Image (spheres, helix red, strand yellow):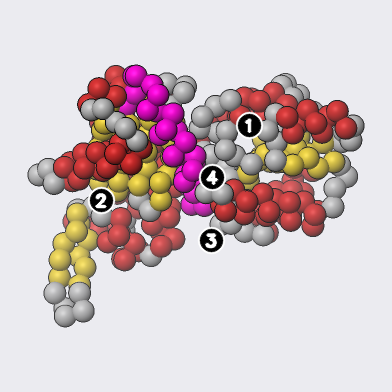
Amino acid sequence: MSKGRILIVEDDPDIANLLKTYFTSLDYEVQTATRGQEALERTRQQLPHLILLDIVLPDIDGYEVCRRLRTHLRTRHIPILFLTQRDERSDRIAGLELGADDYITKPFDIEELRLRVQNALRRAERESLTSPVTGLPSGRLIEDQLRELLRRSDWGLLYIGINGLEAFREVYGFVAADEVLRWTAMLIGEVVDELGTSEDFIGHVGGDDFVVITRADRAEAIAQALRQRFAEGVGTHYAFPDRERGYLVLTDSEGNERRVPLMSLAIGIVRAGDSVFHDIRELTEIAAEARRREMLLPG
């Protein structure tokens, strides 16, 4: 099982290959980028749990990459460790002021780097900043966004759950179920990129629960696209016989069989004008109730 996704942004191929080989051997999932714009694009496509970021890059420098990541709602939580040959105090301060989590100068000790990466990931999980499975914001970051929401006047909240994930996990195991969660997170990101705005927020509450914060007039279109694309793609996670049948067959301890349909999304939508919300607990309760009502709809 992967310890997390690391994005290495480094234009020196020898250093990039060394780091990729090393962290892959430690069971991390590793991607590389040689340019700043490529790093931003890869981060948009699939959120890494941590970024190792060189400062000197062929197009935009690491400082600008860090600045853009820190000013975007969907990426501001990702731990960033600067890798650089610069050892000037002013350079370190500049990086830390932009929100970098650490600053490592070349040449570096690979074991020290491993520990710094490990500590940064643990710190993010301990502070409930990210989901260890999807890399999406979780815990306190979601709560902060919901509190900010109550001060706005034009918003839509999608509370998303995966029907049938527990039965799928029972048959296929937790590794396959985690892959479904990662795929769902990627799917949500793609749909929000297409139909939402640049300021939309995506979070993984935990388990099979996700949230999307967007504009009120975008919420329904995003929900419809998510339901459709999830239904079109979820079959790839099943074995052929289950996919062809359209359901799982589960047997209880007494030998009784029951049929569980293939997974689907249940999405509750709440908009700013639906009610007067006094706190985030009230908001999330109403969103959960909206999702429960959808789960009870025929089909």
Alpha carbons under labels 2 and 3: distance apart: 24 Å
Mark 2 in CB contact with mark 1 (< 8 angstroms): no
Q: Which mark is residue 62?
A: none
Residue 69 to residue 3: above or below: above
In x, y percent, where is residue 161? Answer: 30, 46
Label 3, residues with CA under 10 Å away: few <14, some 14-19, many ≥20: few
Alpha carbons under labels 3 and 1: distance apart: 24 Å
Alpha carbons under labels 2 and 1: distance apart: 34 Å
Of tags 4 and 3, which is closer to the observer? Answer: 4
Boundaries of the magenta span: 130-156
Sequence-wise first label, 3 or 1: 3
* Observer able to see residue 87: yes
Sequence-wise first label, 4 or 3: 3
Residue at 29 percent of width and 31 percent of height: 277
Residue type, numbered disc 3: Met
Q: Which residue is mark 1?
A: 39
Label 4, residues with CA under 10 Å away: few <14, some 14-19, many ≥20: many
Mark 4 in CB contact with mark 2 (< 8 angstroms): no
Alpha carbons under labels 1 and 4: distance apart: 21 Å
Residue at 73 percent of width and 26 percent of height: 63
Of tags 2 and 3, which is closer to the observer? Answer: 2
Mark 3 in CB contact with mark 1 (< 8 angstroms): no
Residue 61, quarter of the rendered image = top right
Q: Which mark is residue 129?
A: 4
Q: Which residue is mark 3?
A: 1
Label 1, residues with CA under 10 Å away: few <14, some 14-19, many ≥20: many
Q: Secondary structure at mark 1?
A: helix
Residue type, numbered disc 4: Leu
In x, y percent, where is residue 290? Answer: 21, 39
Alpha carbons under labels 4 and 3: distance apart: 21 Å
Q: Which residue is mark 2?
A: 163
